[in-house]
Each structure stands twice: as C-alpha cells, then as structure tokens.
Amino acid sequence: MRELILGIDGGGSKTAACLAAVDADGEIEVLGEGFGGPSNVRAVGRGHAEINLNVAVDAALGAAGIRDDTVAWAVLGLAGSSLPDVQAAILGWAGHRSLARQVDVVHDADPVLAVGAADGAGIALIVGTGSVAIGVDSGGRRAVTGGWGHWFGDTGSGFDIGRRALAAVADAADGTGPETVLSERVLQRLHTRNPREMLQRLDHAVDVHREIAALAPLALHAAEEGDAVAAGIVDTATSGTAKLVQATIEKLGLAAEAPLAVAGGIVCSNTLYRETLLRKLAELGTVPSKLVVVNRPVDGCLLMARDRLLQARA
C-alpha cells in the first residue's frame, strides 16, 4: 500500500514543496516538486507566507498530476515556526486547505539534522537569509542557538553580510574606511552611481530585508578574489556562526567531534565560507567528525514524514 507524504521547506528567501509516495517497505518515491517565495511568517507576514505556501504546494501537486488524493502526513520545516502564534497560523492555514490528515510544523533546522545525522544526534546549522543552530543529543535533548531575526541577531547570515557590505561602501565613500571593490559592485546592483542614493534605492525595494541579503554573494565573491574588506566581512560572519555551533555543543555537552549538517544558500553555495567556518570552529576546539552539506532540506521533511507514517502504521 502506498500513501502520500508532503515535505515543505520554507525560509526567508523561498519555499520548496515536495510530494512523495511511501510504499510498504518505507521507500520514498518523489512525485512532484513546487517552489514559491518566502514563507517565514515573522519576516513577510502571515498573508504573504500563506500565498507562497499555496503556490509551492499547488505546483508540487500539479507536477505530480494529483488533485484529490489525500496526503497522509505533511512535515513543514519553516523558519520562525518555533513561536506559538506562528505555529497556530500555519496549522490554521493547513487545516483550511486540508493539507494532510496529519500535519507537523517543525523548526527549520530539524529536517537538516534528519539528513545530516543518521541517529538524529548532532548539530544542524542554517545560514541563509538568517542563521540558527540546533543541536540534539543521544537522549533527545534539544538546544537552539541564534535565530533571533535580523534586528538584533542572524549573525553571519546573508542579511548580516549584506548589511556589512553596505556599511563598507558607506565607509569607503566617507573616507573613514578602506577602498573596496564592493563599492562598484554594490552600487551596480542597486542601479546607482551615487553611494548617497543607496538608502533611497533600498527604500523602493519590495522587500528590503531580502534585497540586503541578496548583496551577500557580492561580498563572498569579492572575498574569493582577494578583496581585503570583503575577506574581513566573511571572517567576521563565520566567527559568528562558529560561535552558534560551539554554544550549542556546550549547552548539550556534546563531544567536540559531533557531526555537523549545514544548510542555507550562504553556507551551501560558497566553499570559502564553509572552509573559513571550519577553521573558526577548530580555533574554538571543535572539529566535526563529518560535515554534511544539505542542499535540499525538503528531503529531510520527507524523511521525517515517512518516519512518522511508519511509526503510526506499526
């Protein structure tokens, strides 16, 4: 007997939905995938989050050619979903559209850990638009570090790097900081030649938060090319995310060799960032026994949905 499961991975930049079938042996067959905009309720609001969730789910169902079949279990790993009001909003949306017979909304780092640690114990670090680390020990105890949002958190994230890039351009323009290739590249991205117009350009962006985070790849590429200012930004960013990992390990009393799974556009797409992060961890006395790059956290959502379904069958 095959039953349908649904995985949804949503963050500050995009949402991925994946519909799959699980057979009697627990094998997963992906049937359809869909994508939408950001679904972090805290970042974009409930209305926009629900729209983007609907877009992603409808696309996945459409790709699978399924309209009326009932999904047995859905697992949603969404940024910002640890707050009770966000949980209630997402579960309300899921109930309204009859998303599945059983729906679980989990921390967005949980699916990353499901992929990166076979026994479920280890550290998951997400560095995308925002940043957060979650750890689980062999007894199931959990600890979350970071994930405070861009106003006073998200250290080392895409937003943090983008903000620092803007500050570096402003400092160079004022003569209070060194020259950097970021000046030309950031201004080009913002379609202006005048640094004083940066704020004006950002004010006209549909989503200022995402627009600033979108500057991060410019800084990462400039660092790879040897720009000293950009390299300093990456160094600071990775120091911050290394501390998230280290603090999580210390909270749970995990071994310094605990496995580390990483996800998110910043840490997954840039080798320099990952290598610098590992160096910063080593300086703190932490050397992961393995590093797993999780490019598709939605696969972890499917694994969690499959495991829950099999447990219910037993």
Image (cartoon, rainbow, N blue to C red):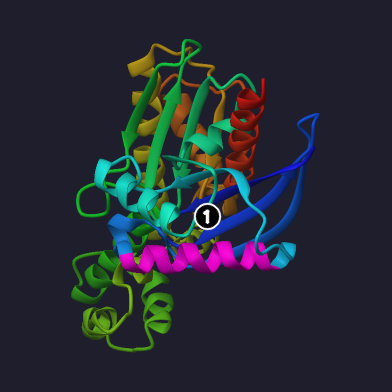
Residue 122, x across and y down, in percent: 52, 22
Percent across and percent down for residue 131 are 38, 45
Q: Residue at x 58, y 67 (%)?
A: 58
On the image, numbered disc 1 is attached to which residue?
265
Q: Secondary structure at mark 1?
A: helix
Q: 48 left or right of 264?
A: left
Quadrant (top left, top right, bottom left, bottom right) of the C terminus = top right
Instruction: Determine crowd level at label 1: few under 14, some 14-19, many 20+ residues with C-alpha closer than 10 A.
Output: some
Q: Residue at x 38, y 63 (%)?
A: 49
Q: Quadrant of the N terminus?
A: top right
Q: Main secondary structure of the magenta part?
A: helix
Q: Is residue 55 magenta?
A: yes
Residue, x 58% and y 45% (percent of image)?
297
Q: Residue at x 36, y 52 (%)?
A: 92
Which stretch did the figure color magenta?
A: 47-62
Q: Is residue 15 above or below residue 288?
A: below
